Image (cartoon, rainbow, N blue to C red):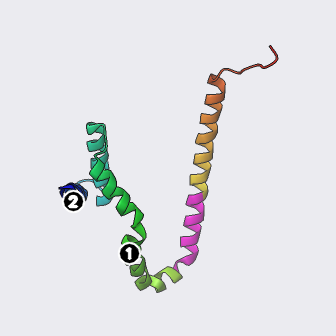
Amino acid sequence: MQWFKYALALLSLVGLWFIGLGLSTFIPLPASLLGLLVLLLGLVWLKRIPHALLTVSQFVLGHMLVLFLPATMGILLYGETLADNLLWLVLSIVISTLISLGITAWVCQRLWHANSVNSPVSNDNE
């Protein structure tokens, strides 16, 4: 009976992807992202993560390399196009990484400063 719960959890993940696929015709976002948003809303509504869904999700995440292998191999078909645009590709990766790191550092600094201002300072000399 346990296998049925796992199969149902896997089918629900696939079903959420199909829901995202349907929503992507109306909302210009990838189907997988929309499916994840629907999953998030459902889990927030449930206020818990079902054990079978957690187990299946951990299994899928643990084997993500195998799941991305076809997409990675598909990139090899566009080797010439990638080589023609290599400078712009590398430049966009570097710039977006620097922007992400900068924003993350800024947010962390703001949170760190807000935390240090609100926390009481202990004085060991008293």
Viewer-proximal residue among 4 and 23: 4
Q: Quadrant of residue 2?
A: bottom left
Magenta-colored segment: predominant secondary structure: helix
- The number of callouts visible is 2
Q: Can residue 18 be seen in the rendering of this structure?
A: no
Quarter of the image where the C terminus is located: top right
- State the CA–CA distance, disc 1 to disc 2: 29 Å
Viewer-proximal residue among 71 and 48: 48
Q: Can residue 3 be seen in the rendering of this structure?
A: yes
At label 2, which amino acid type do we have? Trp
Nearer to us of marks 1 and 2 is 2
- Residue indicated by mark 1: 71
In this rendering, position of residue 126 left or right of residue 76: right
Residue 62, percent across and down? 41, 63
Element marked by disc 2? helix
- Residue indicated by mark 2: 3
User: Magenta residues?
Assistant: 84-97
Residue 126 numbered tag: none
Residue 46 magenta-highlighted: no
Earlier residue among tags 1 and 2: 2
Dot 1: within a 10 Å radius of its alpha carbon, few (fewer than 14), some, or many (20 or more) residues? few
At label 1, which amino acid type do we have? Ala
Position of 96 relative to 42 (above/below): below
Element marked by disc 1? helix
Q: Quadrant of residue 75?
A: bottom left
Residue 114, percent across and down? 61, 29
Residue 106, percent across and down? 62, 42
Residue for point 30% across, 36% down: 47
In this rendering, position of residue 112 left or right of residue 82: right
Q: Quadrant of residue 17?
A: bottom left
